Image (cartoon, rainbow, N blue to C red):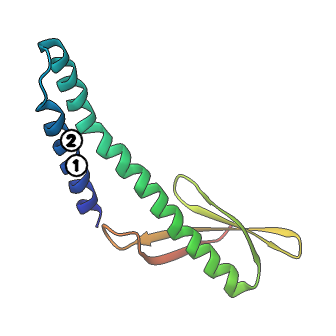
Amino acid sequence: MAPLIIAALYGLMFLLIKLVTSFEFSNETRLIINIVGGISALVLPIIIYSIIDFKLTQRSINLVGQSWCKEQNVELKKVEMHKNHFALICLQDNKKIRKKFRVRFIPTTWFVKSVEWLEK
């Protein structure tokens, strides 16, 4: 799924550049459009993919947090993303509980393969 998203983003960028550069411009304007278009064709798909990846990862770990809280009969407060783990913060009898966990995804997708709960 991830390679398809990247390929589609690059395809759209090159199609957009082809459409824009087919118009008549002066040499200076064409040079500026080619430089800006070339840089954006390389960088924008990576930035867009990073945003998509972040949102889908966030959605997946929120689902893990919601299912754990439902099993334990506690109220979900929030799920935090850290450098090498995720933290689930929930309320039980007005007391905050913090559980750390790691998630393994199925390659090139954002479906959860396994969850490893870390002890304090």
Disc 2 marks which amino acid? Leu
The tag on residue 41 is none
**How far apart in space, not on screen, are marks 1 and 2 (Cα)?**
6 Å
The percent coordinates of residue 80 (x first, y second) are 63, 58
The tag on residue 12 is 1
Q: Tell me the residue at 24%/38% (across/down).
A: 42
The percent coordinates of residue 102 (x first, y second) are 52, 68
Task: Look at the numbered disc 1 and give the secondary structure of its residue.
Answer: helix
Give above or below for 60 relative to 31.
below
- Decide: few, some or many residues near mark 1? Use Cα within 10 Å; few <14, some 14-19, many ≥20: some
Residue linked to disc 2: 16
Q: Quadrant of the C terminus?
A: bottom right
The percent coordinates of residue 99 (x first, y second) are 68, 69
Q: Tell me the residue at 18%/50% (across/down).
A: 11
Task: Look at the numbered disc 2 and give the secondary structure of its residue.
Answer: helix
Q: Is residue 76 left or right of residue 61?
A: right
Q: Quadrant of the N terminus?
A: bottom left
Mark 1 near mark 2, Cβ–Cβ under 8 Å? yes
The percent coordinates of residue 71 (x first, y second) are 68, 87
Q: Tell me the residue at 35%/74% (across/down).
A: 106
